[in-house]
Image (tube, rainbow, N blue to C red):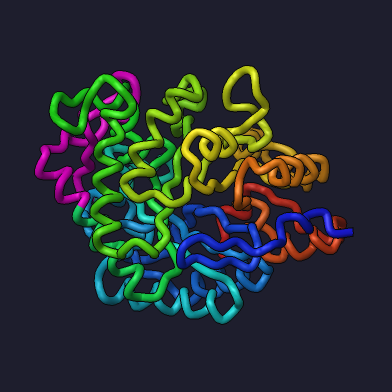
Amino acid sequence: MDLLQALCEPFSYKSLELKNRFAMSPMTRYFAPDGLPTEEMAAYYRRRAEGDVGLIISEGLGIDRAASRAVTFIPNFCGDEALAGWERVLDGVHAAGAKMAPQLWHVGGVPDYNFPDAEHAPLESPSGLIGPNVNGGRVMTEEDAADVVESYARAAAHAKHLGFDALEVHAAHGYLVDQFFWGETNRRGDRFGGATLRDRARFGAEIFRAMRRAVGEDFVLLMRISQWKTGYYDTKLAESPAALEEWLSPLAEAGVDIFDCSQRRFWEPEFEGSDLNLAGWAKKMVGQPTITVGSVGLDRDLFADFEQGGESGVNAASLAELVRRYERGDFDIVAIGRALLSDPSWLRKVRENRLGELTPYSAEAMKILF
């Protein structure tokens, strides 16, 4: 019995055509010396594509702005050598029958929590803050902000030129674009600040307008969003469906095609009075396709893994709930993260009901690349 048969129908939107509704979620791996993708990284991504995942979304990649990375062994998406390396990664993914999108990342004022003493260029942030009254990064000028927008546009042009099938901007979890969204970290008095979510979405919207100009109307642009922030897990930018619409509508109008909606646990309701999760509400309020993600197929969330150690097994009941929500029309694509780190063939094994053959996830899987 195929537990996930409903999610195996093709997905098509603009130029993006996927063989099924499964994506590999972006996960930082720290295996790129001097920011360059390696042959080992290419094999890592190809193995997940060979496991029948329809869309591979890369780990976060630095743009051509020195402050975008806080660790030198996070990969870049700029410079001839790095781009040639990503073209090799893409060739392997395509050969295995999947599509791929690079995820573009700027950390803002946040040092890397796993490597806090790593050397890096001076960090930058909207208002010199990375949390409520927590300092981080120098305050960006309007010229800095404009330069970052153009850096994203150049990266988008590279992605299309190299033959990627889409691209994603990391605008979640308390990093740069999210720092502009959040009132606690955006105290600016210029056009990139403001009292409302719609005001503070302007920086993100400018990024997407610039990228859209660079890639044309048919190339698919994704944006990862979240309510929670790293270190501030109960934060909610939008306290109601109306506030969510106020936040996301200008982004959709600026060019976001698909919202990748990050939650710690996909089955949890986002607002009182409905069991819709973040992806469900985003699709309902804005009308764009959405991706759901958050402990898919596992029996506990990421932070419990870090705190408790040990192994995290498959949760068949949560998979049934995932299918129920998909068939109801809550979202269009499912992103799988940690389960694919420990077992590249996770999807195929689950579909074939070989649950006993799955390699359980443990935090140790984060420390190796295979």
Q: Identify the image quadrant of residue 191.
A: top left
| Residue 353 position within the rendered picture, expressed as x and y whole percent measured from the top left | 86, 59
Q: Identify the image quadrant of residue 3.
A: bottom right
Q: What residue is drawn where x is 28% and y is 57%?
A: 211
Q: What residue is drawn where x is 48% and y is 80%?
A: 91
Q: Closer to the camera, 6 or 1? A: 6
- Classify 150 as above or below 230: below
Q: Closer to the camera, 192 or 232? A: 192
| Residue 22 position within the rendered picture, expressed as x and y whole percent measured from the top left | 63, 58
On-image quarter of the C terminus: bottom right
| Residue 220 position within the rendered picture, expressed as x and y whole percent measured from the top left | 42, 60
- Classify 1 as above or below 327: below
Q: Closer to the camera, 26 or 360? A: 26
Q: Closer to the camera, 304 or 14? A: 14
Residue bounds of the magenta highlight: 121-149
| Residue 13 position within the rendered picture, expressed as x and y whole percent measured from the top left | 51, 60
Q: What residue is drawn where x is 21% and y is 40%?
A: 124
Q: Going by the image, does 5 lie left or right of 121?
A: right
Question: Does residue 345 belong to the magenta stretch?
Answer: no
